Image (cartoon, rainbow, N blue to C red):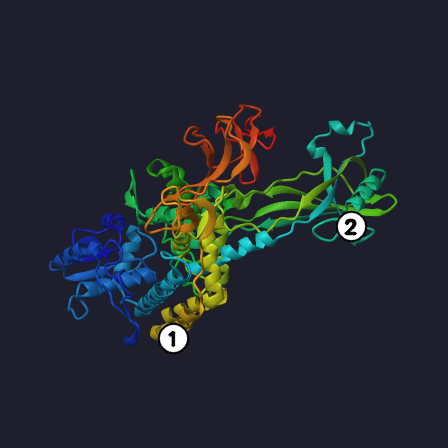
Amino acid sequence: MKLVIVESPTKAKTISNFLGDDFVIESSYGHVRDLPKSKLGIDIEKNFEPQYIIPKKSQKIVTRLKDDLKKADTLVLATDEDREGEAIAWHLIQALGLENSKLPIERIAFHEITKKAIEEALKNPRQIDINLVNAQQARRVLDRLVGYKLSPFLWKKLMRGLSAGRVQSVALRLIVDREKEIRAFKPEIYWTIIAILARESEQDEPLTNLTKEETLEAILSKIDEKPIPLPGLKDKKEVEKITSDLKKAVFRIKEIESRAIEKKPSPPFTTSTLQQTAWQFFHFSAKKTMLLSQQLYEGIDLKKEGSVGLITYMRTDSFNIAEEALKNAQIFLKENLGENYSLATPRRFKTKSRTSQEAHEAIRPTNPARTPESIKEDLTPDQYKLYKLIWQRFIATQMPNAIFEQTDIAIEASAKTKYLFKARGLVLKFDGFLKIYPSKIEEKILPEIKKDDKLALKNIAAKEHQTEPPPRYTEASLIKALEKFGIGRPSTYAPIMSTISERGYVTKDAQKKFVPSEIGEKVAELLAENFPEIVDVNFTANMENDLDDIAENKKDWVSVVREFYVPFEKKLQEKYESVEKQNLTEETGQLCEKCGKPMVTRYGRFGKFIACSGFPECKNTKEIPPVPLNINCPLCKNGKIVERKTRRGRVFYGCSNWPKCTFATWQKPTGKLCPECNSPMVEIRGEEKCSNKNCVFKNGRKSKKQK
């Protein structure tokens, strides 16, 4: 009998469908060994030797696996094929006492949980890759050293309960730096001048009767052959003078240039691009996306097939696709969409990352013929959304480019001054991959015009704009920034997002964008001032490269850890002596109603609060009253809308008369009522919409759906 150990019970259930009675499939439920929580757990004097223990939750599992081993003639370790999976397999050998055992031990790896992939892996077992284990171990040791050494420094210099992380602190700094940029930003007013033009009609048809397709919208780009500097015109008087002059101008077509342009499909998903796109399409958090993709990878019970893995391994930074998958996609396209929508030869994408392993694959469906609609009833709504996204993206990679006809028009306006306007038309000629993976590309149809045609002016308008500060990070944009800087790896993005939120260092605004908390800013500033290398983007990226070199057997993990730790420990001791403790309390001018001592503001896990200065003798505390917005409550009419936060730090809006008035909403009320249904209007991602889900009134108009 062969004992197969995987890390997940769901994965075990799926694999058991493909193997016979000669196999027993068991789960380790993740790691069976870890560093102790109660102490550092690293012997610095003995080459940073980790002092692993078997946690209580894993002891029964290890005992059960040992009993199963007594009946086995071979042990097969089938954990995930990445550093974490390799480390779990190695720890299993240690925990089960098999270092010097004569029992045959096989390590198998696969990118998808299908019958063919499992059988192929069993035919090609390998040894545990100790280099991958060492890379994971080095990361664990480095993170433990930073966390357990630097956190007490924060306790002493700021407040107890704080913690620091090697990678999370860099992410926090990016968020804090962006917030400082936003505060320092000074907006500028500028104008663009837009002309609405139409072909001169022989019948003198009124311009007001023309359809959108019969008009031409053009933007002013040059004045007397001089291009308008970006972002636009900044002198209001000059703008008024130009618009006045243009009302008397003669407009004619100076140039028309049409050409075919092609739009290529995006590469198949990697971990980071899947997390970013799932956020953009569905507002799934990175954590939720990884949970759903884990479920799709490990196996879903399908009525027609039983339990089967629907996608390939979801922690990857490679664009590589297996040849068989490319072939199956081509067959699917020819049979279902025809020759016009398939490629003569498969499209392959080259992975840009130095560290990605081409043996790994991008995230794709295990069977292209298993369409989202065919298994919709077997999936939860969120599983269906993510599977459909992955399926569409992969199928689209093997389809022809979309072809558009783009027309660029130069329009000369002659008045006291010569002006040049530009317009562009875009018409879809062949949808190609867009048939499967739609994109937000708006066609712009132009009227029938030719060079030297004169145009009639329907309207001239100066549109006022204001320069915008850089946007706050969303989970998607923060992951993109981390990947760009080479910080973190596919398995770390979701934990980074969760950790900075759970620590109370950041909250999310109504648009679910990261906002640093006051204590988060103080932590980032203290670390940047005293341990700049810890929160330095380049330093952290270089450390990631060192970990990759360990995985490739180019560097020794102990040397990498020592090179970081020795100067870090020396500086830490110096900073303990030189850095003064910050006083975070502020007087409120109030007296404690219980003991008469002054009340002060303090920081806690959930933000600022008011407490008695006589603590711990007097434990009187209360919330800081929220600042009311200048918006009347739409429910009780008497109270004002105030911004509040949940225990998890998420912002919501409620009535100042709570609990007498129970009005509450996640979206920020605008103070207006919907003209259609009289419900409160709210701000959702920059648009004013009705809070009533059954009413789709927005931005002062009905949507096309409602019309």
Image coordinates of residue 38 in percent, x first then y, are: 26, 61
Tell me what residue is drawn at x 58 percent, y 52 percent: 183
Q: Nearer the viewer, residue 632 or 65?
A: 632
Say whether residue 523 is visible.
yes
The amino acid at mark 2 is Lys
Q: Nearer the viewer, residue 156 or 242?
A: 156
| Left or right, 446 with reference to 452 | left
Please report contact status of discs 1 and 2: CB closer than 8 Å, yes or no.
no
- What residue occupies the far front of the structure in this picture? 596
Tell me what residue is drawn at x 46 percent, y 37 percent: 666
Image coordinates of residue 215 in percent, x first then y, are: 73, 35
- The residue labelled by disc 2 is 222
Image coordinates of residue 343 in percent, x first then y, are: 50, 50
- The residue labelled by disc 1 is 566
Image coordinates of residue 283 in percent, x first then y, are: 46, 43
The amino acid at mark 1 is Val
The part of the image, by quadrant, that contains residue 645 is: top left
| Left or right, 234 with reference to 72 | right
- What residue occupies the far top of the structure in this picture? 677
Tell me what residue is drawn at x 51 percent, y 40 percent: 627
| Left or right, 161 with reference to 507 | left
